[in-house]
Image (cartoon, rainbow, N blue to C red):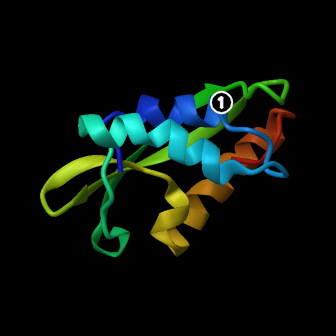
Amino acid sequence: MCSDADVWFQMFEQRPALDQDVSKFFADFFNPYKKSGTCWVVPTSSAYLIGVRTAMVKRADANPASKYVVARVVVGGRGGYITPITLQQNGFDIIKAVSLENQKHGVPLMQ
C-alpha cells in the first residue's frame, strides 16, 4: 500500500513487459518507497474500499496510453492506494470496468 497513487502510476509506466523478470523490477522500484515510509505492506483482507483513482499511462513498451486504476482503501485506520487485484472479486470488477473503457477507446486492455 502506498500513500500516494502516483507511485503506482509511475510503476505501471516503467514496468517491463510481463514476459520479462518483473520480480527484480518490483523490488528495485518499491524498496526506496518502503524505506521512506511512502509504501508499506498491509493485510489486504482487512482493507475497506473507499474509492478509486484512474490515470492514462503510456508504458515504455506500449502505445497508445491506457487507463490504469488503483483502489483507495483504509486499513487499520490508515489510508492509501493498492492495486485492485488484491481486493479479490471487487478488484476484478473494477479492473473489468476499466478494461471495457479501454476497449471502447481502442487502447490496450491490460493493467
Q: Which residue is mark 1?
A: 14
Q: Residue at x 35, y 75 (%)?
A: 45
Residue lying at the far left of the rendered structure: 77
Q: Residue at x 29, y 46 (%)?
A: 80
| Residue 15 percent coordinates (x, y) | 67, 37
Side of 64 where 38 appears, left or right: left
Quarter of the view holding residue 66: top right
Q: How many marks?
A: 1
Side of 51 where 27 appears, left or right: right
Q: Residue at x 81, y 48 (%)?
A: 20
Residue nearest the observer in this picture, 18 or 90: 18
Q: Is residue 54 visible?
A: no
Q: Is residue 77 visible?
A: yes
Circle 1 SS class: helix
| Residue 71 percent coordinates (x, y) | 43, 50
| Residue 27 percent coordinates (x, y) | 52, 47
Looking at the image, residue 46 lies above or below residue 35: below
Residue nearest the observer in this picture, 81 or 24: 24
Side of 74 where 60 appears, left or right: right
Q: Amino acid at mark 1?
A: Gln
Q: Residue at x 80, y 42 (%)?
A: 17
Q: Decide: few, some or many residues near mark 1? Use Cα within 10 Å; few <14, some 14-19, many ≥20.
A: some
Side of 79 where 85 appears, left or right: right
